[in-house]
Image (cartoon, helix red, strand yellow):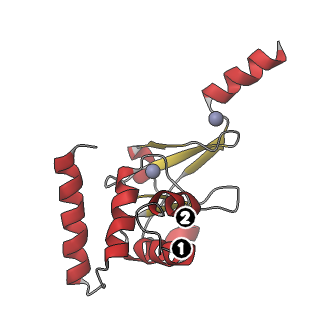
Amino acid sequence: MDQGKLEKQLELFNRTCRERRLKLTYQRQEIYRELVLSDDHPSAETLHARLKEKMTMLSLDTVYRTLALFVRAGFIQKVETIESQARFDAGEERHHHAICSQCNEIINFSCTSIDELRLPKALTSWGEIARRDLVVYGICRKCLNKQKTSAA
Ligand SMILES: [Zn+2]
Ligand SMILES: [Zn+2]
């Protein structure tokens, strides 16, 4: 990610925190920055391991709580995986996800037909829809190829 884009996103984050009166602590800023710089949808554990080097006092619990706060505030997206660990993404643009069940890699994709999909009446009468995310589960091409070679 280029420096200008990173700074712009961090600035927006700082401004939004101030506007919503969310405490802008050093830890929160660093956790957000690390997530913006990660394009591999890290879990809380992975993020914690990456941040631990420069923030030796940072606890995993703080990372969990901070990420939950960011999700509620709409700063980041949470991707539910089949495994117990949720994964996180601070990408600006709205997108959907595909998860490989073998290597656990998560990729982003955009799809306007999903965004514009007419929802069934059961949902529209259910209430107000805030967000719709699609998660596609499967096995990625890389892992499929590996399976083929090991089978041969
Ligand atoms: Zn894979
Ligand atoms: Zn993503």
Badge 2 density bin: few <14, some 14–19, many ≥20, Cα 10 Å = many
The reply to whether the C-beta atoms of the residues labelled 2 and 1 are less than 8 Å apart is yes
Residue at position x 51%, y 48% in the image: 97
Residue at position x 32%, y 52% in the image: 93
* Mark 2, residue position: 44
Residue 76: which quarter of the image? Answer: bottom left
Sooner in the amino-acid sequence: mark 2 or mark 1: 2
**Residue 35: image location, x then y, percent:** 40, 58
* Mark 1, residue position: 64
Image height check: is 36 above or below 68?
above
Image height check: is 18 above or below 76?
below
Residue at disc 1, secondary structure: helix
**Residue 129: image location, x then y, percent:** 45, 71
Name the side, left or right, on which 82 lies relative to 4.
Answer: right
Image height check: is 149 above or below 68?
above
Amino acid type at mark 1:
Tyr
72 and 23: which is toward the camera = 23
Name the side, left or right, on which 101 lies relative to 17.
Answer: right
**Residue 80: image location, x then y, percent:** 60, 60
Badge 1 density bin: few <14, some 14–19, many ≥20, Cα 10 Å = some
